[in-house]
Amino acid sequence: MFFVRTASRQDLEAISALLSQTWHHTYDGIYGAEKVDEISASWHAPDTMEARLEKLNAEFIVADDGIRLGGVAYAAMDPSQAKVAVLHQLYVHPDCQGEGIGSDLLQEIAEAFHDATTLRLEVEPANEKAVAFYEARGFSKTGHTESCGGDSGIPADIYERRLR
C-alpha cells in the first residue's frame, strides 16, 4: 500500500529514476528515446528538482510504500494568476499504474491549495492515457501551447478543473 507524503532531499535520486523510467515508458514512442534522455537529464536531475523542496506556495509529494516510490507530483501557485495552481508533474511508475496512486496524488495536490479556485496542467495530446485520466477526473481542455513548461518547444494541450 502506498502512502502520499511530502518529498524530501533523500528522495531526489529515486524521484529522478522514477521520472526517467516513466518518461521512457510514456514518451519513447512519441519523441524517441534520445529526446527523452535529453529531457530527463535536464528536467529530472536531482539538482534541478531540489529547489522545489523549499518553494513557497508549492506542493512536492511522493507515493511511498516503505520500499520504493510509486509516483510523484509537483504543483505550485501561478505567480501571474491569482487563484490558479499549476500541476507541473504527476507521474506514476509504469509497474504501479492502475492502483489508484495517480488519483491519490491528484487529490492531495487539489486539497493543498486552499486559496486556488482552478487547477491547470499541460499534457502531451498524444499521451492518450494521461488525457483520459485527467478528463475522467473533471478536467476540460481550455487551450494549447506550442511550448510545454514555457520553453521546451514541445506542444501541449492545456486542461483545467475548478477546485472550489
Image: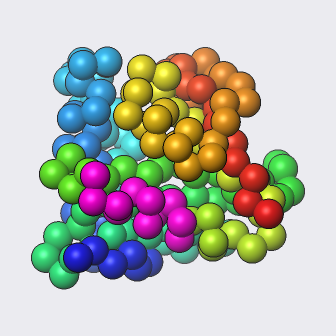
Task: Report which quarter residue 163 is drawn in.
Answer: bottom right
Residue 58 in view of the camera: no
Task: Report which quarter residue 151 is drawn in.
Answer: top right
Dividing the image into 4 quarters, which one contains the N terminus? bottom left
Task: Report which quarter residue 157 is drawn in.
Answer: top right
Left or right, 94 with reference to 82: left
* Residue visible at 75% across and 53% down in the picture: 162
Is residue 101 part of the magenta span, yes or no? Answer: yes
Residue 159 in view of the camera: yes
Q: Is residue 148 above or below residue 134?
A: above
Is residue 103 part of the magenta span, yes or no? Answer: yes
On the image, the x and y values in percent for residue 121 come to 60, 42
Q: Residue furthest front?
A: 136
Left or right, 88 with reference to 44: right
* Residue visible at 64% across and 23% down in the picture: 145
On the image, the x and y values in percent for residue 120 come to 67, 46
* Residue visible at 35% across and 62% down in the picture: 101
The magenta region covers: 98-108
* Residue visible at 86% across and 56% down in the picture: 82
Q: Is residue 155 above or below residue 118?
A: above
- How many numbered marks are there? 0
